Image: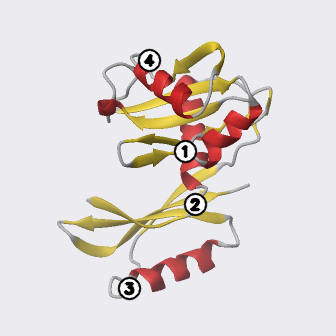
């Protein structure tokens, strides 16, 4: 099956990024920090990303940060970096303007305040639906799914699954339950 994203809420990547980072680390991220998801192949070492972030956005608090993955990248060659800026304005800049690497802009995701192990982050749920009408256009499919799922939460992403480029009525939905 080949996934094709046909709908994605503008906040989905940020919510999914911090949720994934917490799960990977099996602990809570640092409140007040932000997380960047970058392409690892753009850097020889993750510390080069720290340098670029400081150049474009601003200085880190105590010149520190940490990679979420043990060796700075995962199997999919992505790099998750948690950093805390010295100044709040720079944190806002990371969230709104982001980091430019080549022709791509990577916006940071905020780390939510936590109490114990309960994060204030959104709770994302993944749902698979099959036997949907295969003959409708993407706009109609997105509208129907969003309307149908509104009772349960906010649809954050819809990924249409195809088999050898043929859509057979199967989708994967990310739903915000909070």
Task: Name the colour scheme.
Answer: secondary structure
Q: Secondary structure at mark 1?
A: loop
The quadrant of the image that shows the N terminus is bottom left
The residue that disc 2 covers is: 10
Mark 3 vs 4, N-terminal side: 4
Q: Residues within 10 Å of mark 2 (few under 14, many from 20)?
A: few
Disc 3 to disc 4: CB gap under 8 Å:
no
Write down the residue under mark 4: 47
Q: How far separated are the C-alphas under marks 1 and 2?
A: 11 Å
Q: CA distance from mark 3 to mark 4?
A: 45 Å
Real-space Cα separation, disc 3 to disc 2, in angstroms: 21 Å
Q: Nearer the viewer, residue 60 or 13?
A: 60
Q: Earlier in the sequence, mark 2 or mark 4?
A: 2
Spatial distance from mark 1 to mark 3, Cα to Cα?
31 Å
Which residue in the structure is indicated by mark 3?
Answer: 137
Q: Which residue is mark 1?
A: 107
Tell me which numbered mark, 1 or 3, is placed earlier along the sequence: 1
Q: Is residue 4 left or right of residue 139?
A: left
List x then y, in percent, for residue 65: 58, 18
- For label 2, the SS is loop
Residue 58: x and y, percent? 62, 28
Q: Nearer the viewer, mark 3 or mark 4?
A: 4
Dividing the picture into quadrants, the one containing residue 9 is bottom right
Q: Which mark is residue 46?
A: none
Q: Decide which of tag 1 and tag 2 comes sooner along the chain.
A: 2
- Asked if residue 4 is positioned above or below residue 124 in the image, the reply reads below
| Image point (71%, 23%), residue name | 86
Report whether residue 65 is seen: yes
Residue in view at x 53 percent, y 35 percent: 36
Tell which tag, 1 or 3, sits nearer the viewer.
1
Mark 1 Cα-neighbour bin, 10 Å: few <14, some 14–19, many ≥20: many
For mark 3, does the 10 Å Cα neighbourhood hold few (<14), some (14 to 19), or many (20 or more) residues? few
């Amino acid at each position: 099956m080949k996934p094709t994203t046909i709908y994605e809420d503008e906040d989905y990547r940020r919510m999914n990024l911090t949720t994934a980072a917490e799960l990977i680390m099996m602990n809570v991220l640092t409140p007040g920090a932000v997380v960047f998801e970058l392409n690892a192949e753009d850097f020889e070492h993750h510390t080069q990303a720290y340098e670029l972030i400081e150049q474009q956005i601003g200085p880190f608090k105590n010149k520190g940060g940490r990679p979420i993955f043990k060796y700075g990248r995962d199997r999919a060659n992505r790099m998750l970096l948690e950093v805390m800026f010295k100044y709040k304005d720079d944190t806002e800049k990371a969230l709104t303007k982001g980091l430019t690497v080549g022709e791509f802009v990577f916006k940071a995701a905020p780390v939510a305040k936590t109490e114990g192990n309960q994060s204030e982050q959104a709770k994302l749920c993944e749902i698979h639906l099959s036997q949907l009408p295969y003959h409708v256009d993407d706009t109609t499919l997105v509208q129907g799914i969003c309307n149908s799922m509104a009772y349960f939460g906010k649809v954050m992403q819809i990924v249409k699954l195809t088999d050898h480029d043929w859509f057979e009525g199967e989708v994967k939905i990310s739903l915000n339950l909070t």
